[in-house]
């Protein structure tokens, strides 16, 4: 994967820091979803989505649930939380790891069995990135009448509030993400700036290519009115895990 790294002095303009909370490493991959810390993340159409996209949720009977990308809110995202985890063979199968994920779209020149082996061996790891300060994010959307008009059109519209990226373990280490803590960072489009060590006064920047989004979380929108024409603002963004 092509990744750009940039050492940047931590200035007052960037609010970055290391959380003291520790994220669980428990993760199990199924055919249609990834279960991480007890939450089910969608796999269907993941490689076509980015953090902050809004999409139309589909629940076909004979295929995996997925969300059809319609637009983006990524310009409204600033702060994010990042954590790293691995997937072990004891809880996941090769068939499930490859299910609803395109190796050609990944673009790393791998065969499926090579990808699975590297995942189980820990050579490839996963980064969970989620929007921080959700209340501020919601208020910022409400300040954009055009976005509100787009989002209110269908009850099936959802917002991608978290993504799971597959990355090479060496790249996560180069970012300074060496353990399974929760890190704070900033997000600019598809570019992550994360402070790996609050003592080091350096931050590292990471830009993954498309095709590396392995799974994603969705938020369902609770509006201030039932009828579409009367909707003027979002009241709440509610979790919508796979299977609901």
Image: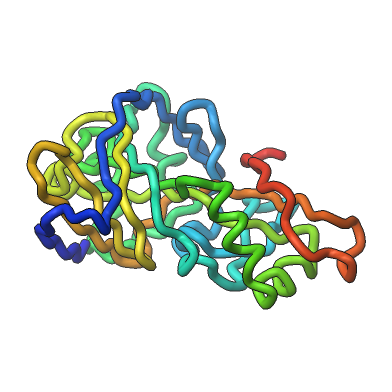
Tell me the quarter of the picture where residue 211 sits: bottom left
188 in relation to 31, above or below: below
The residue closer to the viewer here, 88 or 140, is 140
Which image quarter: residue 155? bottom right
Residue 85, position in %: x, y? 32, 34
Q: Is residue 200 above or below residue 186?
A: above
Residue lying at 63% horizontally and 41% vertically, measured from the top left: 242
90 sits left or right of 118 in the view: right
Q: Is residue 25 visible?
A: no
Please identify the quadrant where the C terminus is shown: top right
Above or below 61: residue 38: above
| Residue lying furthest front | 12
Assign the N terminus to one quadrant of the image. Answer: bottom left
Q: Residue at x 33, y 55 (%)?
A: 186
Residue 100 in view in this figure: yes
Residue, x 68% and y 38% (percent of image)?
A: 243
Q: How is the image coloured?
A: rainbow
Choose between 231 and 6: the one closer to the eye. Answer: 231
Quadrant in the rendering for residue 93: top left
Residue at image position (56%, 36%) is: 40
């Amino acid at each position: 994967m092509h990744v750009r790294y940039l050492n940047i002095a931590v200035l007052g303009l960037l609010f970055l820091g290391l959380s003291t909370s520790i994220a669980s490493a428990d993760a199990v991959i199924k055919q249609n979803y990834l279960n991480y810390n007890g939450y089910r993340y969608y796999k269907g159409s993941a490689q076509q989505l980015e953090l902050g996209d809004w999409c139309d949720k589909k629940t076909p009977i004979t295929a995996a649930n997925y969300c059809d990308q319609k637009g983006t809110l990524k310009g409204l995202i600033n702060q994010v939380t990042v954590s790293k985890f691995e997937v072990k063979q004891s809880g996941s199968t090769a068939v499930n790891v490859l299910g609803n994920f395109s190796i050609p779209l990944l673009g790393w020149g791998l065969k499926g069995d090579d990808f699975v082996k590297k995942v189980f061996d820990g050579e490839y790891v996963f980064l969970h990135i989620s929007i921080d300060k959700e209340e501020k994010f919601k208020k910022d959307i409400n300040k954009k009448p055009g976005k509100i008009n787009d989002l209110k059109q269908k009850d099936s519209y959802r917002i991608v509030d978290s993504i799971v990226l597959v990355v090479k373990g060496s790249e996560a280490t180069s970012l300074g993400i060496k353990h399974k803590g929760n890190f704070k960072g900033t997000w600019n489009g598809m570019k992550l700036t994360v402070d790996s060590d609050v003592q080091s006064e350096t931050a590292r920047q990471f830009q993954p290519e498309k095709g590396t989004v392995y799974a994603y979380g969705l938020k369902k929108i609770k509006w201030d009115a039932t009828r579409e024409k009367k909707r003027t603002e979002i009241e709440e963004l509610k979790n919508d895990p796979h299977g609901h």
